[in-house]
Amino acid sequence: MTVGRAEAEIFGEKTTFLSITAFMLAGALALWSGLFYLNADWQFMTVDPAAYHFTRIFLAVFVLMFALHLFFREIVTEGLVILYTAVSCAAFSICALVLGLDGDATTDAIMAPGILLAALMFFHRRNYLLGAATIAFTVAFVLGQLFGSAAGHQATGVCLVAAGVLYIYYACGNLILSETGRNLLRVTQNQVLPPEAPDRDHAYELVAVAGFFVFSTLMIQLGYQFAAVPTPSRSICVAELFLALTAVGFAVYALVRGIVLEGTLMLVFGLSCSIFSAIVLVGYTPSLAVDFFVGVVAVVVGISFVLRGERLLMVGTLLLAAGELTATLLGAFVLGGYAILAGAVCLGYFAVSSWIVLETGRDLLPVH
């Protein structure tokens, strides 16, 4: 009798198995991107730029779907890497293919610390191959911001190719291992797993880590635009729209699971950034009324955090409120941008602290 796939034995560690396809597609996306970077100077293949960007967008959409799948299977660290991979590649290619613009490397620089932290988590798990691939991917994100010209393109391309090859090798090796129990490619798996506790709230962990990490990244993008960009950047708005819709997804999940304060804050801010980005992308001037509404809601949520004893969340939320209200009521966008950036630091610190507790069980960055 043939054994159904659901009844077959899976060899190896479960989290590694669930992320195999995601990293295979992310590796293909990174490899394709890196080859195009190198081809711009070395001309070793013939590729139509439109075909390149269309393929990149198509792959990025599927990678993004796998990121959301990982999140809702409570696989947070891998999900964040896959998410940022998809957002970066999709944003650059949509800018080029649809808007006729160059992508803004600032977005990659903003997301790089999150990917670097994920790499460190992989090393903590003794999953050295996945950690090395993610380090290469982080370096590619940073090089695009630090260097221009041909040398910068070549260095970024080499790092992307290296990351792509390592991700694909990792995925293929673990696919063989999970199906046969034989580690033919000598790949690594997670050796140190996140600690389990009987009173763990998986829903709140997802919101506190992935939700607030995406939320703080979104705040940095908005604060940067308020403080440093004279007019809204359409290139940044593409990535901002992706992250804003992801934040809305986390908000809906939080509200459905009864996490009301965090979900409400993410929902109104995510919708505000989605509206702001969409209006800029279609060529109109966004209204400040929505930002004023976000500021008012953030004040109420911030006060509620005080009553709940969450001082760090309170400070970050009230700084967001101050930034939104300063920009809308006084027109002081630079000052408002800096307030939003300060709030992003607080909420990002909360997310990183929760992330470390999730992965190690140790409260290395106290938040109370």
Image (tube, helix red, strand yellow):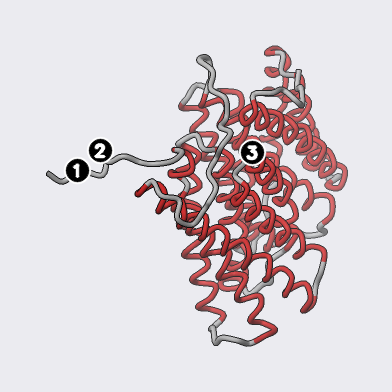
Q: Is residue 60 left or right of residue 221?
A: left
Marker disc for residue 3 = 1
Q: Which mark is residue 51?
A: none
Contact between labelled residues 3 and 1, with CB atoms less than 8 Å apart:
no
Q: Residues within 10 Å of mark 3 (few under 14, many from 20)?
A: many
Mark 2 — residue? 7
Residue extending furthest toward the left: 1
> In the rendered view, would you say 291 is above or below 285?
above
Check disc 1 and give the amino acid type. Answer: Val
Which of the two labelled residues, at mark 3 and mark 2, occupies the earlier sequence position?
Answer: 2
What is the three-letter code of the residue carrying label 3? Phe
**Amino acid on which the number 2 mark rests in the picture:** Glu
Name the quarter where the C terminus is drawn: top right
Q: Are marks 2 and 1 in contact (CB under 8 Å)?
A: yes
Q: Which mark is residue 269?
A: 3
Percent position of residue 174, x then y: 46, 51
Which residue is found at the position 61% from the left and 35% from the top?
266
Alpha carbon separation for disc pair 1 and 3: 49 Å
Asked which quadrant contains residue 336, the reply is top right
> Is 116 rendered above or below residue 326?
below
Q: Which quadrant of the figure has residue 9?
A: top left
* Percent position of residue 307, x then y: 70, 12
Tell whether 101 sits left or right of 93: right
User: How far apart are labels 2 and 1 at the CA level?
Assistant: 6 Å
